[in-house]
Image: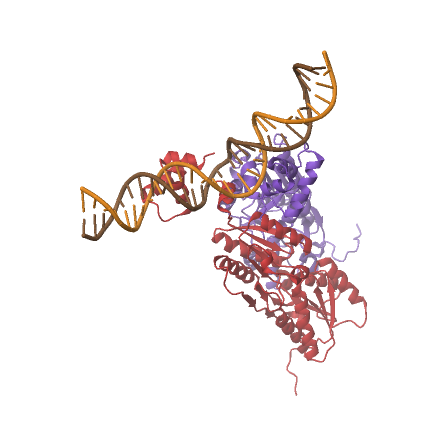
Chain colours: A purple, B red, C brown, D orange
Amino acid sequence: MAHIKDVAKQAEVSVASVSRVLAGHPKVSETIRQRVLTAIQELGYRPDLAARRLRSRQTNTIGLIVSDIRNPFFTEVSRAVEDVAYQHHMRVILCNADEDAEKEALYLDLMRDENVRGVILSPTLVTLAGFHTSDYPFPIVLVDRCDQNTIADAVVLDNVDSAYRLTTHLIENGYRRNVFFYGTTSATGRQRREGYAAAMAAHGLESHAEPLPAIVERARAAARERLRRRPLPDALVASSGLILLGITEALREAQIHFPDPVTVVGFDDLPWTRLVEPGITVIAQPIYDIGRAAIELLLQRIAKPEQAVRRVVLRGQLIERGSSVNRNNPTGLVTAA
Amino acid sequence: MAHIKDVAKQAEVSVASVSRVLAGHPKVSETIRQRVLTAIQELGYRPDLAARRLRSRQTNTIGLIVSDIRNPFFTEVSRAVEDVAYQHHMRVILCNADEDAEKEALYLDLMRDENVRGVILSPTLVTLAGFHTSDYPFPIVLVDRCDQNTIADAVVLDNVDSAYRLTTHLIENGYRRNVFFYGTTSATGRQRREGYAAAMAAHGLESHAEPLPAIVERARAAARERLRRRPLPDALVASSGLILLGITEALREAQIHFPDPVTVVGFDDLPWTRLVEPGITVIAQPIYDIGRAAIELLLQRIAKPEQAVRRVVLRGQLIERGSSVNRNNPTGLVTAA
DNA sequence: AATAGGTGTGTAAACGATTACAAATATCAC
DNA sequence: GTGATATTTGTAATCGTTTACACACCTATT
């Protein structure tokens, strides 16, 4: 394995010059630059990252701590983050905290050990509660989850409003007894519940919100349970893609072919929501954009540590499908007034 | 930030002793061990990874290079790999090669730079073609993709046999004109095509295999195209979950409610295959087990570099659902002979 | 011609751990 | 009590870079 010394010898220059060429330093003559470059070629030299990091006290790594890598939302976010990061010659360490605050803390420590330049994090409620950017030696951008009180760079959906629009859409189409299933570990679930409750209240309807751990199995169980009770609801509303999947499975189990007598709508425009007849109405999140905004925010923050804290809010898009077909006017004909 | 020197001073021992305690070295007296441990506590000391790696020329990192992180197969594999790796105090660097041989090579170089202990790789055909373990300074375990000629540790499905069973099942249930859609970038797609072709031939039927890039959009387009031609096939067979999704979307677009006149079956028991009526017959891969086997194989190889090359082959499970209902006897009644 | 101010280049000191080796101490047999 | 041996502990070299600083050289100004 060739070292920087060998390159220096081969190019008949000092190690400092080699290092300067490597760093793209401006004050180095074209002659030397060329000699070094060919020497590097000839020897197939690759700098030792460990030595470099030790001496320079810097890495080109950023950390991405997601709460569940199996959630398609986070795989898409990861994808966006990696795409942009690699364009900027930054490496990404991806960690999976499993909706577990302890693991989150563990990984944040790991990030410190790794000397990362910054972190993108989708925090649990617990972590978010006492969250202060200043507790960490690197900048942090929150993604998907953030509340009003937290002072930190963040990229989130307009959760309250999206849930409000989704619920209002349901109500206007004649679904009035709507049950909301939401994840308890995230701020996002709570905010969406809030939007749901506001919409219900605005129409003089009673809220029924069911908190649960945001995984498919628990959502299925909760929905199954609810479908056993009477009176049946008009609609089940899911606060995330995973919960939506669980609910849909429960409906299928119960042989209920939505939209009648019970229908289902929710968050996240996953491919299969179009596939199951007659299609599920959802709020589509611009997931890739969320991820991209997060990494761009982080890169800016790294470049300018002192810039003002920013919060990017992206709008969810209501996609109407068969599961929210108008019950008031099921024939689709215009009723005479 | 406290250094090892500070700890040594605080504990009134030498830096060597501190280092030995940190490494869990056996020859260190209980007295010193305790003094060091409390000093570490008091100072909140955390060793500098860069320095440690530079001096010891070792990391506790393994690399995982997958071909598409958005493919649920690979997210599940990642999950398994990370779970087991972290239990063994190993970090994982996850990279996404995007079915691109150049990116694969790039990431393998990156792995070398990072001095990883080993790599798990799902190679493209191009990379697999000239693959020699000895070209790399670390052990490599192939996952999901490997051909007969490649000499390397590997964990794969019984692709040929699974495809054979799936196709035979179709034929026996009365579907005879079956078209196989498979990804061209992976050895897996080819092997499954082989099993399909063998089953067709065994029943005196003609093969129709359509190669395509293994992404949803291309599969949808290919299926759409095929559905336009006449005569219509009896069944479309997908060699992967993403292709299955594309085909199912095309069927929906064309308003074809499988199993009649055209049905669909394929690989990967994704949650939605149960959901779309009347359910899609699939080969279920034991994905988590595949990932776990891969990381365990790698850890063993790291521990014993000279052990014999191993190939672990896991069996796919045929899950029969509505999409392969028996056409010979559609009523389900026993026909009098 | 002497001085000042740039350039560009080289030398050597970091960076913070691990670890070979030497030194000190403990253990034991006689 | 002595020497031999085994066991801990400490000192200092080392890993491969980056970078502060010094130095040599060149140009421009007086």
Residue A19 horizontal/vertical position (percent): 62, 37
Residue B295 horizontal/vertical position (percent): 53, 58
For the residue pair B163 and A100, the one nearer the viewer reads as B163
Q: Residue at x 73, y 65 (%)?
A: B211
Picture quadrant of residue A133: top right
Picture quadrant of residue B204: bottom right
Can residue A310 be seen here? Answer: no
Residue A229 horizontal/vertical position (percent): 55, 58
Q: Is residue D29 left or right of residue B1?
A: right
Can residue B102 be seen here? Answer: yes
Residue B173 horizontal/vertical position (percent): 67, 77
Check the image and report above or below for A233 versus B9.
Answer: below
Q: How many marks?
A: 0
Q: Residue at x 54, y 65 (%)?
A: B309
Check the image and report above or below for B259 versus A81.
Answer: below
Q: Is residue B232 left or right of residue A110?
A: right
For the residue pair B216 and A54, the one nearer the viewer reads as A54
Check the image and report above or below for A156 versus B300.
Answer: above
For the residue pair A257 and A23, the one nearer the viewer reads as A23
